[in-house]
Image: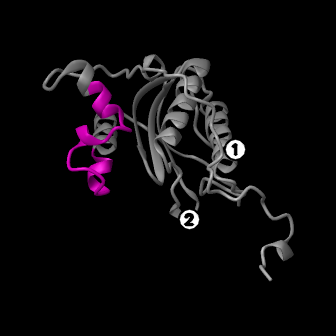
Amino acid sequence: MGPKPRIEFPGAMHHVTGRGNAKAPIFCEPCDYEAFLELVAEAVALQGWLCHAYCLIPNHYHLLFETPEPNLGKGMLRVNGTYARRFNWRYSRVGHVFQGPYGDTLVKDDDHLAEVARYLALNPVRAGLVDSPDAWPWSSHRVRRAAKGPGVPQPRRHPIAARRRSRLPPLRRRRDAPTEVPRRASQLVRA
């Protein structure tokens, strides 16, 4: 039995998730988070999506998109595929970065939207990474609070594409990573 087909239609709201293979980290350094957010911002601009919220945790991510056109699969293929290639190159790895295809839950109504937004904001707190959602730098919660201040109703649209888009220096291989990847199993064994 194959995977169930994805439901895409104009104006759909999607809670998109992705997790590292075997729950391994997919973000190891701040530049990894920045590179992923740059890819998401590019996809938002290219596909015409609205990004309402996001939260990046060391071993997974959550994104909350509204898609005016049914093109979520096309954009996520670009985001996950490009990021996986960059991640593997940077850390001299091979194989899967993500545990499987991205997860996608359709947001059904405003109550569900509010629940997902709360879940995303509290995710780093529940994971024990910080004491407050405001303290996590890789979440839209902090960006939105800084823009509007506490107690002010937040707009539904989060302008990730307009987010500070610093030009990152080109990704470089880690100096402590092996320079060669073994081509055959016999090369893995040391004499």
Q: Quadrant of residue 169?
A: top right
- What residue sits right under mark 1 in the picture? 85
| Pick the front one: 97 or 15 | 97
Q: Disc 1 on helix, strand or loop?
A: helix
Q: Quadrant of residue 2?
A: bottom right
Dot label at residue 22: 2
Q: Which residues are magenta?
A: 122-144
Name the residue: 58% across, 33% down: 8
Name the residue: 86% across, 69% down: 184
Determine contact: label 1, label 2, CB under 8 Å.
no
| Pick the front one: 72 or 121 | 121
Depicted 87 relative to depicted 53: above or below: below
Depicted 142 relative to depicted 177: above or below: above
Residue 17 appears at what percent x and percent y?
49, 46
Is 26 placed left or right of 180 in the picture?
A: left
Name the residue: 71% across, 61% down: 1
Q: Quadrant of residue 168?
A: top right
Pointer 1: residues within 10 angstroms few (<14), some, or many (20+)?
some
Going from N to C along the chain, the mark reached first, 1 or 2, is 2
Is 42 placed left or right of 121 in the picture?
A: right
**Which residue is outermost to the front?**
175
In magenta segment, residue 125: yes
Q: Disc 2 on helix, strand or loop?
A: helix
In magenta segment, residue 13: no
Residue 172 appears at what percent x and percent y?
64, 40
| Pick the front one: 159 or 25 | 25
**Disc 2 marks which amino acid?**
Ala
